[in-house]
Image (cartoon, rainbow, N blue to C red):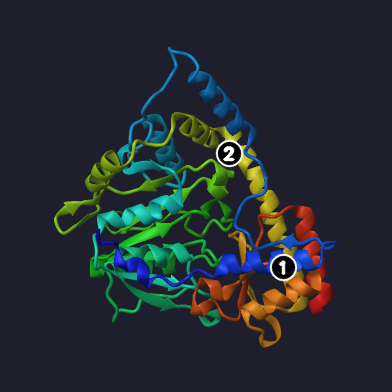
Amino acid sequence: MIPNTNYGNLKQSYLFYNIAQKTKAYLEANPDKRLYRMGIGDVSLPLAGAVIKALHEAVDDQAQKGTFHGYMPECGDESLRQTIADYYGKRGVTLSSEEVFVSSGASDELGDILDLFGKDKTVMIMEPAYPAYVDANIMTGNHIIHVASGKENGFLPMPDESQKADVIYICSPNNPTGAVFSRSQLQQWVDYANKIDAVILFDAAYEVFIEQEELPHTIFELPGARTCAVEICSLSKTAGFTGTRCGYTVIPKELERGGMNLNAMWVRNRTTKTNGVSYIIQKGAAAVFTDEGQRQIHSNIDIYKNNAKVLMEALDKLGIWYTGGKNAPYIWMKCPNGMGSWEFFDYLLEKIQVVGTPGEGFGKCGEGYFRFSTFGSPEDTKEAAKRLVELLG
């Protein structure tokens, strides 16, 4: 048997392993201390009541012959696909249900979608980046162009006409930086992709956190996107589905490359490689888009947004540069006093028991920066902010 030798090109992922080891060692040496975890990107609030009710109803359906569901349609339940298309319609984006594919989550889909492009492609990834973007393409055997960004451009790099790629990753609002492309900035990427015949993989996992109406929630708000973009979204951060797993992917029917239609290709892929998302999960997902579900999930999101305000107020008081927080659930701050990102991690852990994520773990452009998540409890967030001010003030 010949293995996929591309796996040998992967760098060992030290980020979260090192964080876990460092925090474990600290707690073993200081059993009386309590940590304030502002690094994890997982949600802390439970599923909305409307979702729980729908999940229970779906379980009961499976107990009765007349309402039992076996295999679901591989591309998603038709009613849920239409519901998601209608959700886009509220932002003035017209989709057919056949352009929406229900998935088991954005992380799964971001890796699987590479099947559409084959091997040995050139892929453009903006750094700092969600590590899975890079690793999935290394596993596939693609060539990666790392597009650098930094404080000078607000971590929002723009197209370089001298570079060419087959696939372009864009995450907005961004993980880890929390930066959000404006309409005009994103339009430049759409125009560029159409010009060079590239496909944009637009990660919209955090769109629900956008507060400023002038910022695009979906790439399909922009002219030309239907001929160059695939959008991948998730209910994980939108509705707390991190442990429940459901998302959706939008592939317009106009999107073609090399004489092949990517929507039709993805139908073939899903009907070959999956048996669909379970009936129970899709029933819960549908409840997210009801009026009551929307009211409840936005109530939770408001709590996370308030956490962001608390942390931003602390950083403003300290005069520390950051991006994100507003329009995104992550805050990306410049490490103070020229500290490296791991140096700052150790400093916060030892001095005030606050845990964040070193920026270096998201690529070379992340060195000297630090990510805070706003998904923790309000009580822990307030205490962490207070300790930051006392330590760095």
Report the amino acid beneath label 2.
Gln
Left or right: 275, with 51 as reference point: left
Task: Say if 120 sits above or below 297 in the image.
Answer: below
Left or right: 117, with 372 as reference point: left
Q: Which mark is residue 294?
A: 2
Residue under pointer 1: 25
Q: Is residue 77 visible?
A: yes
Residue 358 in the image: x percent, y percent? 61, 73
Q: Which residue is at a point 37% across and 56% down the rendered structure image?
A: 111
Left or right: 141, with 347 as reference point: left
Residue 194 in the image: x percent, y percent? 26, 65
Q: Is residue 220 visible?
A: no
Task: Say if 168 sits above or below 283 in the image.
Answer: below
Mark 2, mark 1: which one is toward the viewer? 1
Residue 176 in the image: x percent, y percent? 55, 66
Task: Say if 265 sits above or below 163 in the image.
Answer: above
Query: Which of disc 1 and disc 2 is earlier in sequence?
Result: 1
Report the amino acid beneath label 1.
Ala
Local crowd size for mark 1, using a 10 Å CA cut-off: few (<14), some (14–19), many (≥20): few
